[in-house]
Image (spheres, rainbow, N blue to C red):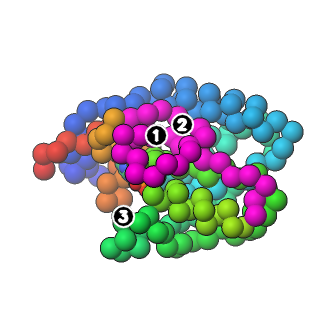
Amino acid sequence: MPMPYREKKIDHMLVDRETIDAFIKRLGKEISRDYRGEELFFICVLKGSFMFAADLIREIDLPCQIDFMSVSSYAGEKTTGVVKINKDLDSSIAGKHVLIVEDIVDTGLTLNHLKSLLSTRNPASIGIVTAFDKPMRRRVDIHVDYVGMEVPNEFIVGYGLDLDGYYRNLPEVAVLSDKE
Ligand code: IMP
């Protein structure tokens, strides 16, 4: 089926496949080195990070597990970043080295809340890895341990990132046009 919606809205490509593949390989090496001798428990934050998580864990040279969580902001409370858990983890993270896998860190509010919430479950450690980062938009001082690449303050789609559920299937990352 043709996708007129997509053709109409995409302004330009921002990140190509080679760049994505290169930062995934780099992150895989860094994480595997930093956690050498340990096991890792990845938490894939649905839905946006499913593609990144799938690529990233294939570059991890350590014993690891992965589980999935789905969170959303409480309606009307976007500014606080308080999140509602739509799908929780299936297993305990107590005593485990945890890495939260995100698609993009924007204001940081969602991750800030999610990290505090998961910290109460007594993991051995808890870190954050994100494919994309918009540091200019940050509203809370949250430490992101591993960043694929920084992107400008524009709305991007593709490689798992969506607009109203669309464009996740784009293999590359694009900037959407302001024009309807
Ligand atoms: P934060 O709490 O503001 O950091 O929100 C992060 C979440 O907002 C991400 O996990 C995405 O789901 C979404 N988001 C932020 N910026 C973009 C973007 O440029 N494109 C698509 N989704 C985005």
Residues under numbered marks 3 and 1 in contact, where contact means CB atoms less than 8 Å apart: no
Residue 83 among magenta residues: no
* Residue 99 visible in image: yes
Mark 1 / mark 2, whichever is N-terminal: 1
* Neighbours of disc 2 within 10 Å: few (<14), some (14-19), many (20+): some
- Spatial CA distance of label 1 from label 2 is 6 Å
Residue nearer the viewer, 176 or 132: 132
- Spatial CA distance of label 2 from label 3 is 24 Å
Q: Indicate the secondary structure of the residue bearing disc 2.
A: strand
Q: Within 8 Å: ligand 1 and the Cβ of disc 1?
A: yes
- Viewer-side label of 2, 3: 3
In x, y percent, where is residue 2? 26, 49
The residue labelled by disc 1 is: 132
The dot on residue 147 is 2
Type of amino acid at the residue the image marks with label 2 = Val
Residues under numbered marks 1 and 2 in contact, where contact means CB atoms less than 8 Å apart: yes
Q: Residue at x 60, y 62 (%)?
A: 116
| Vertical placement of residue 77 versus 46, above or below | below
In this image, 17 relative to 157: left or right?
right
Q: Residue furthest right?
A: 37
Q: Indicate the secondary structure of the residue bearing disc 3.
A: loop
Q: Indicate the secondary structure of the residue bearing disc 1.
A: strand
